[in-house]
Amino acid sequence: MPTITIMDPVTRIEGHMKVEVTIDSVAGQMQITDARCTGTLFRGFETLLAGRDPLDAPVITQRICGVCPISHGLTSVLALENVSEYRPLRNARVMRNLTQGANFLQSHILHFYLLAALDFVPGPAKAPWSPAWSVDLRPGLDQVMANLPAALEARRRAHEMGAILGGKMPASHTFIPGGFTATPTSAQIAAFRGHLQFLADFIQKRYIPDQGNRIWNSAAQDLQ
């Protein structure tokens, strides 16, 4: 008889999800024979925007996600520019891209060290990491958790870097059709560069090596 395993909710995504997996014997081996995913949370941002001033969209849509708000704000601005005569100047595009890049960095650091890595390595023996689920941990990844404090600092600095240009994080109000509402000072540019240098150093010396260790150790474990 097939076994149906239900995971509800799957919470490490925006919106939550229900997953049903059917496991059955195929040619004498247990295999996944069916899988179904169902979105279980309707948030209705399209409904929230109905009847509102189009300029509200970049502000409201950023509330879709606290991790990647800038993507939604920028997409809303681009959509408004596609149906209007507004066109951003080069400096505005640069400012948008730098703010988006800062958010991109903090999002990836958060995902790896605080969401994905803890599926493979044990966290510190204290709250909120313990008590923990008994899961399929992978050996040889201790350095990932050793770098967790530095990762938290790196994510904080990425947030601050984005706020220098975006006004605040996680949601910025500087994205408007046709431009960007802020003009950086020389001091702000210097502060942005300081954070960027710190992050570049962290990514080269810690993040990329940790990613490589996770991939290779996980692959070796699967082959055993």
Image (spheres, rainbow, N blue to C red):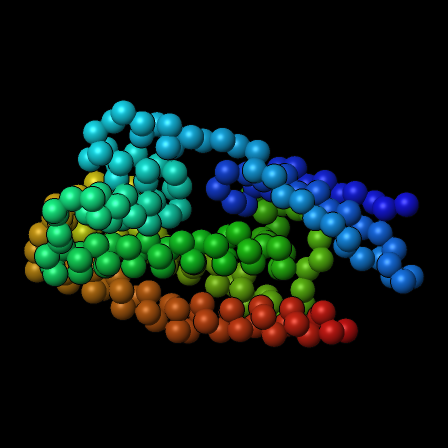
- Locate residue 58 relative to residue 119 in the image: left or right: left
What is the x, y in percent for residue 222? 72, 69
What is the x, y in percent for residue 6? 72, 40
- Locate residue 168 relative to residue 20 in the image: left or right: left
Q: Observer-nearest residue: 65 or 224? A: 65
State which quadrant residue 153 falls in. Answer: bottom left
What is the x, y in percent for residue 161? 25, 55
Q: Residue at x 22, y 34 (%)?
A: 54
Q: Residue at x 70, y 48 (%)?
A: 35
For the N terminus, the image quarter is: top right
Q: Residue at x 37, y 32 (%)?
A: 46
Q: Residue at x 52, y 45 (%)?
A: 13
Q: Observer-nearest residue: 166 or 89? A: 89
Q: Observer-nearest residue: 173 or 122? A: 173
Instruction: Using the image, determine if residue 53 lies above or below residue 16.
Output: above
What is the x, y in percent for residue 216? 61, 74
- Locate residue 10 relative to residue 199 in the image: left or right: right
State which quadrant residue 157 falls in. Answer: bottom left
Q: How many marks?
A: 0
Residue 22 seen in this snapshot: yes
Q: Observer-nearest residue: 172 or 34? A: 34
For the C terminus, the image quarter is: bottom right
Instruction: Using the image, determine if residue 20 lies above or below residue 190.
Output: above
- Locate residue 14 relative to residue 168 in the image: left or right: right
Instruction: Using the image, determine if residue 62 lies above or below residue 93.
Output: above
Residue 70 seen in this snapshot: no
State which quadrant residue 177 falls in. Answer: top left
